[in-house]
Amino acid sequence: MAITTTLTLKSDAGDLLTDELSVVTSKDLHKAGTTTDLNQVRMGRNEIPTGTSFDLLDATTLAINKANKVYVSNLSTDETYYITLVIDAKTIGRLYGGDWMFIPWNCDDATHDIEVTASTGTNTIEWACFHEGETLPTQGD
Amino acid sequence: MATTAQINIDSTTLMGDFPIAWTATGRLYKAGTTTDISETTGLGRRKLAATTKVDLITWANETATADKSAKLYVKNTSTSETQYVQVLINSVELGRLYGGDWMWMPYSGGSGEDLEVAPSTDDAVVLEYMLFFE
């Protein structure tokens, strides 16, 4: 079995719309342009203090022009807490406490790191990057 | 009850000793509150048949406020695994959606910060999308 990702968007009648909204979609994660399963992952859980922008994912060590996917979830329980996500100096958006995102990521040059900045307070996040083509760095000092 | 967005990520083979069965559910609230988001573009479909980069969401055409908690859904409905669409914000590429791929992202928006798409081929491809905003 591959890595299967499923999105369920749901709103009961009378909430967002007069009628019920339900969108469900599912996709297995494949290597770019193939039906071969993605087979590498990075993942973690971090506490992000306010005041500094951090690199969550470094673009330089992953294969470019591929079908990488990134998941980030803000575990903060305070709705006023949020993190701002940036790629190549371009703000993507804010994940408030309880929000998550799942996006494609083309780390096509060193400036395409995914950066994260916390606001209001220390935010705890969980994240994963499903990808291909990563080679571990050679041994340093 | 608010509008909810749930993701499930499952795999028993990626890491054989550590099967993945993740679930996260987010409620769509206005920024910094527990008040439900109450506006949306509705679910749209857009057919593209050229590699030309075009706006999927032109921020100035929406009544959305920037730097809030807007969320965007986009799906490439193509059944071809080789046919992809580049997704960009104001010419900065986020990544590629191959046939069947979907994405769910926060979207700060703002003047000129349009959500753009550029198909990889001239073959027709249909995108489905929906913006939730305040």
Image: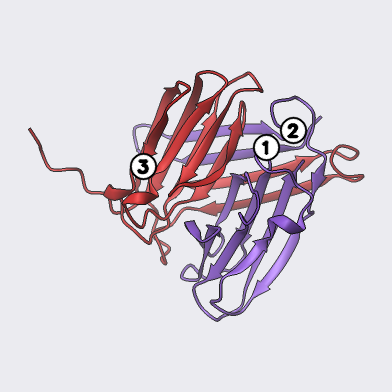
Relative to residue A92, is residue A68 drawn left or right?
left
Asked if the residue under mark 2 is in contact with the one under mark 1, i.e. CB atoms within 8 Å, the reply is: yes
Residue at x 73%, y 32% (from the top left corner): B29
User: If you read the primary sequence from the N terminus, does the residue marked by circle 1 or circle 2 appear first?
Assistant: 2
**From the image, which quarter does the C terminus of chain B lie in?**
top right
Q: Amino acid at mark 3?
A: Val
Q: Is residue B12 visible?
A: no
> Residue B7: x and y, percent?
60, 40
Distance between mark 3 and mark 1 Cα atoms = 28 Å
**The colour assigned to chain B within the rendered structure:** purple
> Residue A93: x and y, percent?
58, 41
Q: Chain of mark 1?
A: B
Q: Which chain is displayed in red in the rendered image? A: A
Q: Nearer the viewer, residue B20 or A63?
A: A63
Q: How many numbered marks have been drawn onto this rendered protein structure?
A: 3
Distance between mark 1 and mark 2 Cα atoms = 6 Å
Q: Is residue A129 above or below residue B42?
A: above
Q: Is residue A58 visible?
A: yes
Q: Nearer the viewer, residue A62 or B102?
A: A62
Q: What label sits on residue B30 in the rendered view?
A: 2
Q: Amino acid at mark 2?
A: Lys
**From the image, which quarter does the N terminus of chain B lie in?**
top right
* Pointer 3 residue: A41
Q: What label sits on residue B69 in the rendered view?
A: 1
Q: Amino acid at mark 1?
A: Ser
